[in-house]
């Protein structure tokens, strides 16, 4: 994880840093893939030319009706009465001493409807209990009982997988309509198949899916990458953990501190990609021959991948955040073959050409066109990165990094960010931004700079329309939102089904934090659960990878259904659009990867809609299931 020293004093001047593969921090930055020197220089020049280009922050005109803002606290912290009381396990506690990087990264959260009752449930990956008493380290599954109460049922429902867990991906691997779970570990990963609300470990029936015994897998994402109608799987791996060697080496010096070693100086591990064979068993076959092109890059320290249509050409692309090395952008040719283009597209590195410690990833639409923005959280003494999508031609994607100008860069300088979300939290029609914070090294409290602390408050930025500056409302978000903590993963989910999106954070060695959304302003909203029929007569499945467009009052909003996002997590599959004072929607437009645009005229608002794309490409409004 990189470190710098002084905070930025405005937009940084362009400089040639470690972006094309120069040394930086401990160890050396490896090139992403074999290519000629002239090609690397061309890519770097493209990156820096984009930095020099005038980006401008486009702003939408805020209508007078949309200026009614919520004036009280945005969130209220839930207490132990919810039942979310377990301690997130990640090796020895801070008091005992954390000496290995694996014990500092933290664990992810998956949102899913485990039993198809319409309520969103929660799944928490767990590490190991490093205390002398050695408590239970099974992953935690909480069934949503309604009325703000949850029941832990991991053991009873077969989901209490025990490993050194990190990531939690919820997706339907076998297309039976039940949401399954894929758990990434330090060591073999696990696929837990949902069979009517109970889970069964089917990893052994899927050769190669567990990965190597010595692999450290972290984030994962699912999507129909090859356009054949089923969900494929990409798994990011981090770095080798030879504990005997690390024990002998002891701590390493970084930022004037003695801290756990890595990732620089440790061997990066190659990511994995699995193609779904479309059978009833949903076999995920390892792409060992690299037919996809996703595995032809030099291994990096991967964290969070996400499949999404990033250039609006109708197929799913892939973005991967990498710690201390260049991020990846894989563009899909429409047939499941990918080409890595992050440097040429301006999303490989920071604004000044420097590599950064990419952690979490949010994909969203600030100006609500069809071209998604990317937000990447980074290390302390690095600003978080906001990449605005300025693509003008299909096949030539381009993003501008505008974090400083947009008001989200400088406030993050002394923070270390993890999970993150684009969302309209107050339903005013403009996209907000949230990110979780907490330093990875407990030792930082005794080391300079003084403003970099181990426990850190979370951040909330309110959207003002388009790419215009976001307003830092972290201190006004509510007393439960702001206290410093060891935050890691974060997920967006409407747990009480009131049309307002709540937040859940994992916290290293502490119970999770649930924040109820308490915004009240009379704004209208629309929720959409998108389903598709794989073939005539089959059970509907989540339409992962679909793009939704809402048209109302002369405006457009775009949302994407992504499986695998934030930090090692999976979020609420139901899409949410705030409408502000607009009280009618003209139409909804839905497009599946590789499919036509499907239209629903004049849908109702202020409710959760259930939409089905049928096997013959018709869009149906389903009755909302009763409770």
Image (spheres, rainbow, N blue to C red):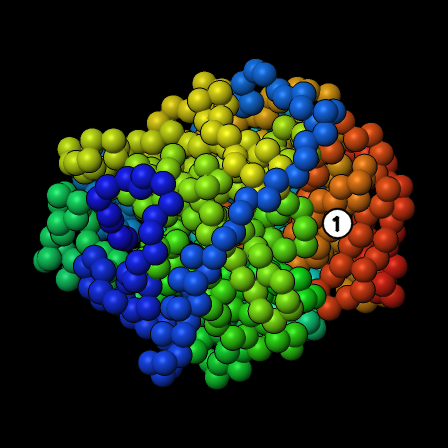
Dot 1 alpha-carbon crowd within 10 angstroms: few under 14, some 14 to 19, many 20 or more: many
Residue under the image location 43 percent in, 78 percent down: 296
Residue with the mark numbered 1: 549
User: Left or right: 21 with respect to 250?
Assistant: right
Q: What is the quadrant of residue 225 in the picture? A: bottom right
Nearer to me, 83 or 433: 433
Q: SS for tag 1?
A: strand
Nearer to me, 86 or 370: 370
Q: Position of residue 142 (x, y in %)?
A: 55, 37
Can see residue 382? yes
Q: Is residue 13 above or below residue 302?
A: above
Residue under the image location 28 percent in, 61 percent down: 17
Q: What is the quadrant of residue 594 in the picture? A: bottom right
Residue under the image location 30 percent in, 31 percent down: 455
Can see residue 301? no
Quadrant housing the C terminus = top right
Q: Residue furthest top?
A: 72
Nearer to me, 551 or 619: 551
Q: Position of residue 533 (x, y in %)?
A: 80, 60
Q: What is the quadrant of residue 247 in the picture? A: bottom left
Q: Is residue 329 above or below residue 474?
A: below
What number of labels is visible?
1
Q: Position of residue 500 (x, y in %)?
A: 65, 30
Q: Position of residue 245 (x, y in %)?
A: 15, 62
Residue under the image location 45 percent in, 75 percent down: 295
């Amino acid at each position: 994880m990189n470190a710098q020293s002084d905070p930025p004093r405005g937009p940084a001047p362009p400089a040639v840093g470690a972006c094309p593969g120069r040394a930086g921090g401990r160890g050396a930055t490896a090139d992403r893939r074999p290519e000629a020197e002239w090609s690397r220089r061309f890519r770097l020049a493209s990156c820096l030319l984009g930095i020099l280009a005038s980006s401008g922050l486009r702003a939408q005109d805020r209508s007078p009706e949309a200026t009614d803002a919520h004036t009280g606290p945005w969130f209220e912290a839930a207490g132990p009465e919810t039942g979310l009381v377990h301690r997130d396990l990640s090796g020895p506690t801070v008091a005992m001493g954390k000496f290995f990087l694996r014990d500092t990264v933290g664990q992810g959260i998956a949102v899913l409807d485990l039993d198809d009752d319409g309520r969103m449930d929660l799944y928490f990956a767990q590490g190991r209990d490093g205390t002398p008493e050695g408590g239970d380290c099974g992953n935690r599954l909480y069934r949503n009982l309604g009325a703000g109460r949850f029941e832990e049922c991991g053991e009873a429902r077969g989901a209490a997988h025990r490993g050194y867990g990190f990531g939690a991906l919820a997706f339907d691997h076998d297309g039976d309509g039940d949401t399954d779970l894929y758990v990434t570990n330090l060591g073999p990963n696990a696929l837990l198949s949902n069979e009517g609300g109970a889970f069964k470990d089917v990893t052994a029936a899927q050769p190669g899916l567990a990965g190597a015994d010595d692999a450290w897998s972290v984030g994962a994402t699912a999507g129909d990458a090859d356009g054949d109608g089923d969900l494929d799987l990409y798994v990011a791996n981090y770095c080798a953990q030879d504990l005997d060697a690390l024990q002998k080496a002891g701590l390493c010096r970084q930022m004037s501190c003695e801290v756990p070693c890595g990732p620089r100086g440790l061997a990066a591990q190659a990511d994995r990609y699995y193609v779904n064979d479309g059978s009833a068993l949903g076999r995920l076959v390892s792409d060992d021959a690299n037919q996809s092109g996703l595995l032809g890059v030099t291994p990096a320290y991967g964290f969070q991948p996400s499949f999404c249509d990033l250039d609006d050409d109708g197929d799913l692309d892939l973005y991967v955040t990498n710690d201390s090395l260049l991020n990846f952008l894989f563009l899909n040719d429409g047939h499941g073959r990918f080409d890595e283009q992050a440097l040429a597209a301006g999303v490989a590195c920071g604004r000044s050409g420097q590599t950064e410690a990419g952690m979490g990833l949010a994909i969203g639409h600030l100006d609500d066109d069809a071209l998604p923005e990317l937000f990447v959280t980074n290390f302390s003494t690095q600003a978080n990165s906001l990449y605005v999508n300025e693509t003008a031609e299909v096949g030539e994607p381009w993003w501008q990094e505008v974090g400083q100008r947009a008001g989200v860069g400088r406030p993050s300088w002394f923070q270390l960010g993890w999970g993150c979300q684009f969302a309209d939290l107050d339903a005013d029609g403009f996209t907000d931004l949230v990110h979780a914070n907490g330093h990875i090294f407990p030792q930082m409290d005794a080391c300079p700079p003084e403003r970099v602390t181990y426990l850190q408050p979370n951040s909330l930025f309110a959207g003002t329309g388009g790419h215009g500056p976001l307003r830092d409302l972290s201190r006004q978000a509510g007393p439960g939102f702001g206290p410093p903590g060891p935050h890691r993963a974060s997920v967006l989910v409407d747990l009480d089904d009131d049309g307002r999106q709540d937040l859940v954070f994992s916290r290293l060695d502490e119970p999770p934090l649930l924040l109820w959304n308490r915004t009240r302003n009379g704004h209208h909203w629309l929720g959409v659960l998108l389903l598709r029929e794989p073939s005539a007569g089959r059970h509907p499945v989540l339409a992962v990878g679909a793009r939704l467009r809402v048209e109302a009052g002369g405006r457009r909003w775009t949302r994407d259904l992504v499986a695998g996002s934030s930090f090692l997590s999976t979020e609420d599959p139901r899409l949410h659009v705030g409408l502000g004072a607009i009280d009618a929607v003209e139409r909804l437009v839905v497009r599946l990867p590789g499919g036509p645009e499907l239209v629903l005229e004049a849908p109702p608002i202020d409710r959760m809609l259930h939409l089905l794309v049928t096997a013959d490409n018709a869009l149906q409004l389903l009755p909302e299931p009763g409770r």
